[in-house]
Structures are given as C-alpha cells and as structure tokens.
Amino acid sequence: MTNLVKIATTVVAAGLIGGASFAAQAAPVKSGYENEVKTCISQVGEHANYDQARRVRHTVVLVEETRFRYKFTIQTSVFTDSENAAARSYDASCTVLANGTPLEFEIKTTG
C-alpha cells in the first residue's frame, strides 16, 4: 500500500492581465523536497494554460520516495475571476531525481 504524504499547497497569485509579470508565492514545503517540488511545478507551468489567470493553486502530494528519486502528483487549478470555481484544472505526475533533475512528467486537462 502506498502512503500518500501531502507536501504543500502552493498558491500563485499574479495580475496577469495586461502583460504584468507572473509572481509566485509558495507556502512552506517540507524540508528536503523544495528543489524537487519547484522542478515539478515549473514543468506544470510549461504545459498548463495560465492565460488570464488571477490565481493558480498547486496541490502537491508525495506518492513515492526512494533514496534517489521522488514521485509527486500535482493538482493545478487556474482561477480567472473572483469566483471559487476553477476555469481550468490539470492533474500531473512528476518524477524527479533527488538533485531536482526531472525524469518523467505527464499532465492531463481535467476541467
């Protein structure tokens, strides 16, 4: 049986309308996983559509850990207005080496 460990919920907030820069603010991540989580979130950012996003939420869960690699699932929600419903959502799976080097990445649109 796999033990799931919720690592962090990262909230990215930015005024993206009008070409403003994309600023990120992350919640604290369990010590030892910071680089690996950042690598996976950046992979999501390369594939997800953040157009007109007012905020983006990433929920990261550690699903497998070995001495040299980590596997995370990431649920990403993109909010374009002040409503509580996400305009777009994604599920991703990311495997990285302990030094932050990406090994595998999959993403699918879920909403």
Image: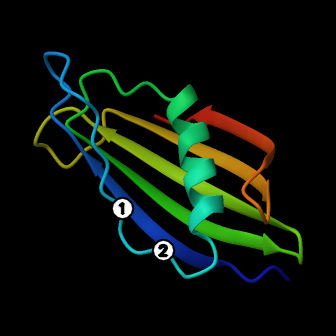
For the residue pair 46 and 111, the one nearer the viewer reads as 46
Q: Residue at x 63, y 78 (%)?
A: 32
x and y, in percent, of residue 77 in the image: 39, 45
Secondary element under disc 2, as helix, strand or loop, is loop
Occupied quadrant, residue 55: top left
Q: Is residue 68 above or below residue 11?
A: below
> Which amino acid type is shown beneath numbered disc 2?
Val
Q: Is residue 91 above or below residue 80?
A: below
For the residue pair 24 and 89, the one nearer the viewer reads as 24
Occupied quadrant, residue 72: bottom right
x and y, in percent, of residue 21 in the image: 24, 29
Q: Are marks 1 and 2 in contact (CB under 8 Å)?
A: yes
For the residue pair 73 and 42, the one nearer the viewer reads as 42
Looking at the rendered structure, which numbered label has been put on residue 26? 1
Secondary element under disc 1, as helix, strand or loop, is loop
Looking at the rendered structure, which numbered label has been put on residue 29? 2
For the residue pair 106 and 83, the one nearer the viewer reads as 106
x and y, in percent, of residue 58 in the image: 44, 54
> Which amino acid type is shown beneath numbered disc 1?
Ala
C-alpha separation, residue under disc 1 versus residue under disc 2:
8 Å
Q: Residue at x 50, y 35 (%)?
A: 45
Where's the C terminus, which quadrant? Answer: top left
Left or right, residue 62 beside residue 25: right
Mark 2 Cα shell of 10 Å, populated few (<14), some (14-19), many (≥20): some
The total of numbered circles placed on residues is: 2
x and y, in percent, of residue 18 in the image: 13, 16
